[in-house]
Image (tube, helix red, strand yellow):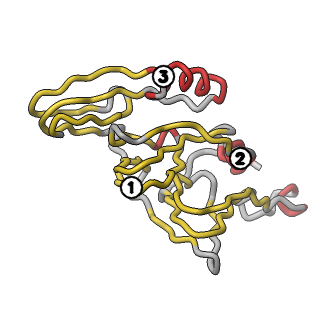
Amino acid sequence: MAGDSVRAKNGSMVAYDGRMAFKKLSGGGEGIRGMVTRRLTGEQMVMMEVKGEGTCFFADRASEISLVSLHGDKLYVEASNLLCTDGGLRTGTSFTGLRGGASGNGLFTTTVEGTGMAAIMSDGAAVVLRVTPQYPLSVDPGAYVAHQGNLQQNLQSGVNFRTIMGEGGGEAFQMRFEGDGLVYVQPSERNTVGGDV
């Protein structure tokens, strides 16, 4: 950094050189309104602002880190998968509906928008999958990390009589993405409500 700032998950700094100042941000860096919104939605995210000159290193639980470049667009990412963003990017929350409930992450997700870089974390190296109008994509909710672009998402249910009888394939719910954009998945699965069906 050369006098600029980044926002990072609180406590994720592992080393730095140069001169840095650290400040805890309320409401995920969105002020009082963001703090109230996040408490109401359950999309908890404690961030800090880091300003200074030099190099700052961030990490969390030895997770793999992927850099996502934003050019005036919006990234949808689970709060637990967001490590840091350029200081000029705006964060917020967005309603995800049943998709979030089935993935066990709640009914809301974190949004990052503007122009700059965001660092997202995954359990194993993230796989970036392209979605086009000709090639929609279905994803296990437990492997979902983030998405960006002009995508519509909905929840598909694979629950049928065989699932109820214990003979299903173990993939009761999938997230289906249609449109044009990118979806980030991890090569491991979180425990989800859908996975228990």
| Dot 2 and dot 1 residues touching (CB under 8 Å) | no
User: Secondary structure under badge 1?
Assistant: strand
User: Secondary structure under badge 2?
Assistant: helix
* Side (left or right) of 181 relative to 96: left
Question: Residue placed at 68% from the left, 45% from the top?
Answer: 96
Q: CA distance from mark 2 to mark 3?
A: 29 Å
Q: Answer above or below: position of 158 versus 33.
A: below
Quarter holding residue 97: top right
Q: Of 126 and 48, which appears nearest the observer?
A: 48
* Residue 64 showing in the rendered view: no
Answer with mark 1 or mark 3, whichever residue precedes in sequence: 3
* Side (left or right) of 182 relative to 153: left
In percent of width and height, residue 101 lies at: 71, 42
Q: Which residue in the rendered view is the most extreme toward the bottom?
A: 134
Which tag is nearer the camera, tag 2 or tag 1? 1
| Dot 1 and dot 3 residues touching (CB under 8 Å) | no
* Residue 111 showing in the rendered view: yes
Q: CA distance from mark 2 to mark 1?
A: 25 Å
User: Secondary structure under badge 3?
Assistant: helix
Q: Which residue is mark 3?
A: 31
Q: Which residue in the rendered view is the most extreme toward the right?
A: 161
Q: Which residue is mark 2?
A: 102
Question: Residue placed at 13% from the left, 34% from the top?
Answer: 53
- Quadrant where the N terminus sits is top left
Q: Which residue is mark 1?
A: 68
Answer with mark 2 or mark 3, whichever residue precedes in sequence: 3
In percent of width and height, residue 143 lies at: 55, 55
